[in-house]
């Protein structure tokens, strides 16, 4: 039977649920399990294709042409798998599917409601990844933050689904923040306690806490979190800020996140994860012997996430060639039609990359 891991977030957004999910997937994959990841986004857009890049970052296009969340790029890069439309579902798509079914008479005239119709559609999308038995473990990232009104149908669907398949087949990882107050020189657990209470009010008890923090958690803090959040001591996982996102699987391996997940899912842990290739990649990434400068001509350079996959591709290509790639963003509007000025602006770069969506005119081609 396919096992399920859900990753929720609390306290604040942008803590890195996608990176934690991808890192866990990498560790489980390195132990020999077949893993995939999907993301549920709580916004009402049918997909992120029409979202402003300044607000949402890049729109990641999968092999089947689906316009999806940028986290799917992380999933593919970490797990070396191809994702599809099925890996990214939005509230807009959930409601669209339900309304189409209602118009087609599939509900036989019943009143269509959030419960059970919306929650059933969410559960159907969760199960869709397991059809065919291709995966041992499905990791599902729930976008947004616990307490947001938009997330409530997903939490209710998670509560129901966990009850249906059993707690040994479905576990919840809650990613939260342990802020460090410099004036008091203390790490504070209260935001995490409140976040877990929000989750418990939705009928969900997290199995594992992953705590983002600037400072290392001592045993006293871990005991306090375990006691007040009702989790095991060993299930309080420290997630220190990392130099690069590609350090995170190593950090999570040290914290035994994968082993704890397998224990709670009652799966044979097998051998330790083989991260030799990953560590070789990290070694090259952190110890380059060459350096090149690349100009990135784009329209949305103010937000690096708007061109996330481009930056990440340079990181991977550079590491493969033991080269540090310094990408210098240049706004397309500053390049005018004067060939001499364009040439001067781009002088000294080893290469120029024009971001998708920017017309490459004859002047830029010549320079």
Image: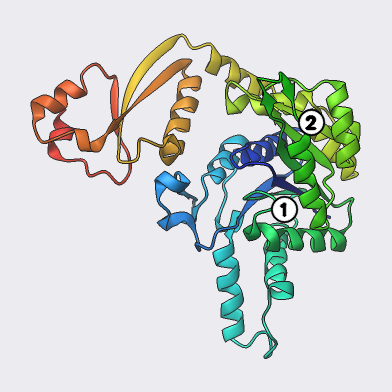
Q: CA distance from mark 1 to mark 2?
A: 29 Å
Task: Read off the residue under disc 2.
Answer: 237
For residue 337, side relative to residue 166 (left or right): left
Q: Secondary structure at mark 1?
A: loop
Q: Which is in the foreground here, disc 1 or disc 2? A: 2
Give the residue displayed 48% in from the left and 26% down from the top. Answer: 315
The foreground one among 181 and 261 is 181
Q: Residue at position x 88%, y 35% from top?
A: 226
Q: Residue at x 9, y 25 (%)?
A: 340
Up/down of 220 relative to 100, above or below: above
Give the quarter of the image for residue 348. top left
Question: Where the C terminus falls, by quadrant?
Answer: top left
Q: Position of residue 8 (x, y in %)?
A: 71, 47
Rendered-image quadrant of the N terminus: bottom right
Q: How many marks?
A: 2
Residue 243, x across and y down, in percent: 58, 20
- Element assignment for label 2: strand
- In this rendering, position of residue 107 left or right of residue 190: left
Q: Is residue 312 left or right of residue 253?
A: left
Residue placed most toward the observer, 184 or 312: 184
State whether residue 109 appears in this view. yes
**Disc 1 target residue:** 134
Q: In this view of the protein, which residue sits in the foreground, 118 or 124?
A: 118
Q: Position of residue 306 (x, y in %)?
A: 42, 41
In this picture, is 138 found above or below 269?
below
Neighbours of disc 2 within 10 Å: few (<14), some (14-19), many (20+): many
- Label 1 neighbourhood size at 10 Å, few (<14), some (14-19), many (20+)? few
Residue 293 or residue 345, whichever sits in front:
345
């Amino acid at each position: 039977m396919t096992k399920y891991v859900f990753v929720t977030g609390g306290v604040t957004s942008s803590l890195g649920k996608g990176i934690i999910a991808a890192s866990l997937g990498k560790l489980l994959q390195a132990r020999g399990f077949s893993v995939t990841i999907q993301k549920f986004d709580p916004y009402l857009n049918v997909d992120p294709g029409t979202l402003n890049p300044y607000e949402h970052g890049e729109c990641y296009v999968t092999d089947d042409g689906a316009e999806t969340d940028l986290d799917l790029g992380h999933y593919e890069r970490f797990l070396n798998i191809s994702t599809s439309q099925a890996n990214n579902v939005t509230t807009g798509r959930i409601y669209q599917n339900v309304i189409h079914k209602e118009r087609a008479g599939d509900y036989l005239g019943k009143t269509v409601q959030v419960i059970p119709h919306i929650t059933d559609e969410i559960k159907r999308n969760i199960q869709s990844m397991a059809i065919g038995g291709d995966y041992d473990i499905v990791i599902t990232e729930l976008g947004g933050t616990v307490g947001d009104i938009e997330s409530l149908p997903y939490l209710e669907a998670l509560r129901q689904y966990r009850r249906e398949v059993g707690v040994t087949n479905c576990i919840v990882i809650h990613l939260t923040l342990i802020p460090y107050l410099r004036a008091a020189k203390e790490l504070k657990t209260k935001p995490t306690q409140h976040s877990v209470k929000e989750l418990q009010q939705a009928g969900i008890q997290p199995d594992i806490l992953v705590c983002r923090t600037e400072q290392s958690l001592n045993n006293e803090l871990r005991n306090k979190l375990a006691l007040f959040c009702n989790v095991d001591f060993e299930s309080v996982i420290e997630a220190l800020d990392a130099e690069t996102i590609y350090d995170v699987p190593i950090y999570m391996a040290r914290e035994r996140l994968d082993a704890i997940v397998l224990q709670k899912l009652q799966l044979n842990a097998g051998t330790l994860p083989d991260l030799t290739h990953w560590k070789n990649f990290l070694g090259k990434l952190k110890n380059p012997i060459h350096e090149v400068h690349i100009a990135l001509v784009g329209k949305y350079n103010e937000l690096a996430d708007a061109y996330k996959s481009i930056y990440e591709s340079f990181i991977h290509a550079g590491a493969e060639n033991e080269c540090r790639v310094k990408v210098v963003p240049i706004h397309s509007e500053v390049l005018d039609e004067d060939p001499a000025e364009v040439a001067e602006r781009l002088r000294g770069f080893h290469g120029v990359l024009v971001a998708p969506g920017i017309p490459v005119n004859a002047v830029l081609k010549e320079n």
